[in-house]
Amino acid sequence: MTVRWRLREVMARQRMKNKRLAELIGVHPNAISCLKTQDKMPRIGGDMLNALCTYLDCTPFDLIEYLPDRPTSDLEH
C-alpha cells in the first residue's frame, strides 16, 4: 500500500505559491517547500491539514491518493 501526497499538484492547480500559502497558514515558506516536495504522506497534525484544505479550497482526499498494492498473482503475468 502506498499513500501518495499530492500537495504539489493541488498547489499547481490553484496557482498557489509557497510564500503565499506560508503567509496564510502562518509558517515559514521552507515548511511549505518541505511539505510540497514529499511524495509519501508526511506526518502532519490535524491543524495543518485543516489549514491546507482551507486555504487551498480542497479536501484531505484531494491531497492524499491511496494506491493499493497489486496482488502477487498480478505481477506474475
Image (cartoon, grey):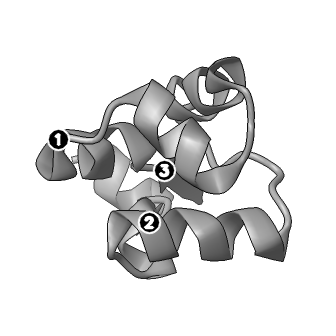
**Residue sitting at x 43%, y 37%:** 20
Residue linked to disc 2: 55
Q: Are marks 1 and 2 in contact (CB under 8 Å)?
A: no
Q: Circle 2: is it few (<14), some (14-19), or many (20+) Cα within 10 Å?
A: some
Residue linked to disc 1: 15
Q: Earlier in the sequence, mark 2 or mark 3?
A: 3
The type of residue carrying mark 2 is Tyr
Q: Which mark is residue 38?
A: none
Q: Secondary structure at mark 2?
A: helix
For this view, does 70 lie left or right of residue 16?
right
Q: In the figure, 34 relative to 71: above or below?
A: above
**Residue sitting at x 58%, y 38%:** 22
Task: Report the front residue among 52 and 2.
Answer: 52
**Residue sitting at x 50%, y 49%:** 5
Task: Report the front residue among 57 and 65.
Answer: 57
State the separation of the CA atoms marked 3 and 1: 20 Å
The type of residue carrying mark 3 is Arg
The type of residue carrying mark 1 is Arg
Residue linked to disc 3: 4
Q: Earlier in the sequence, mark 1 or mark 2?
A: 1
**Residue sitting at x 62%, y 23%:** 29
- In the rendered image, residue 2, in percent from the top left (x then y), is placed at 56, 53
State the separation of the CA atoms marked 1 and 2: 12 Å
**Tag nearer the camera, 3 or 1:** 1
